[in-house]
Amino acid sequence: MVQVERILCPVDLSEFSPRTYDYARSVARHYQAKLFLQHVVEYNLPAYAYYAPPSYIVEHMQQVRNDAMLQLQEFAKRRADYGALPECIVHEGAVTKWILSFAEVLKRERDEE
C-alpha cells in the first residue's frame, strides 16, 4: 500500500487555486499526511527600479514576499473547515525551479527519517 506522508500543493492564488487546494487537502486528510501550501513570487521590477537605490529594491522585494505570505495564510484560513492548517511556504524566484526544489527537499527529509 502507498504511504503518503507529505503533500505539496503549489498555488498561484488565481481562480483555480481553491479547487486545487481543496483536492490536496482532501487527499492529505485521507492519508493523514502533512500538507504544505506553497506560493512562489516572481519579481517583475518596473523599469524605474534600475534608477532606485538598492535598499529600495530590497525593501520592495521583502514587502512583496511578506504580502504574499499574508495572502497565502488568509487563503488557507478562508478554506479551512476543520483540522490543522497547512504549513505555508513562500519562495521567491523561478516558479518551476522552486516547486521542484522544494519537492526534492521534502523527499530528502522523508528519506532521512
Image (cartoon, helix red, strand yellow):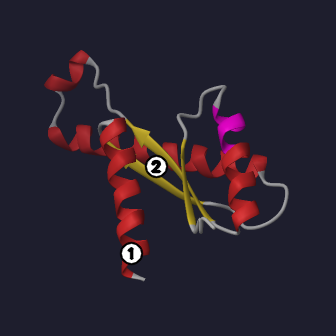
The quadrant of the rendering that contains the N terminus is: bottom right
Rendered location of residue 77, percent (x, y): 73, 53
Along the line of sight, which residue is nearer the eye, 90 or 25? 25
- Between 14 and 53, the residue placed more toward the observer is 14
Q: Is residue 79 magenta?
A: no
Span shown in magenta: 17-21
- Of pointers 2 and 1, the one earlier in the residue sequence: 2
Residue placed at 53% from the left, 34% from the top?
A: 12
Q: Amino acid at mark 2?
A: Asn
The residue where tag 2 is placed is 66
Quadrant location of the C terminus in the rendered image: bottom left
Q: Please name the residue shown 66% across and 25% down the image.
A: 15
Amino acid type for the residue under numbered disc 1:
Asp
Residue 97 in the image: x percent, y percent? 30, 42
Question: In the image, is 8 to the left or to the right of 19?
Answer: left
Task: Categorize mark 2 by other alpha carbons within 10 Å: few (<14), some (14-19), many (20+).
Answer: few
Give the vertical position of 90 relative to 60 (above or below): below
Taking the spot 46% from the left edge, 49% from the top edge, the residue there is 66
Give the labeled residue for mark 1: 111
Question: Mostly what secondary structure, the magenta segment?
Answer: helix
Image location of residue 42, percent across then percent down:
35, 33
> What residue is shown at x 79% (from left), y 66% (from top)?
83
User: Label 2 vs label 1: CA separation?
Assistant: 31 Å
Describe the element under mark 1 as helix, strand or loop: helix
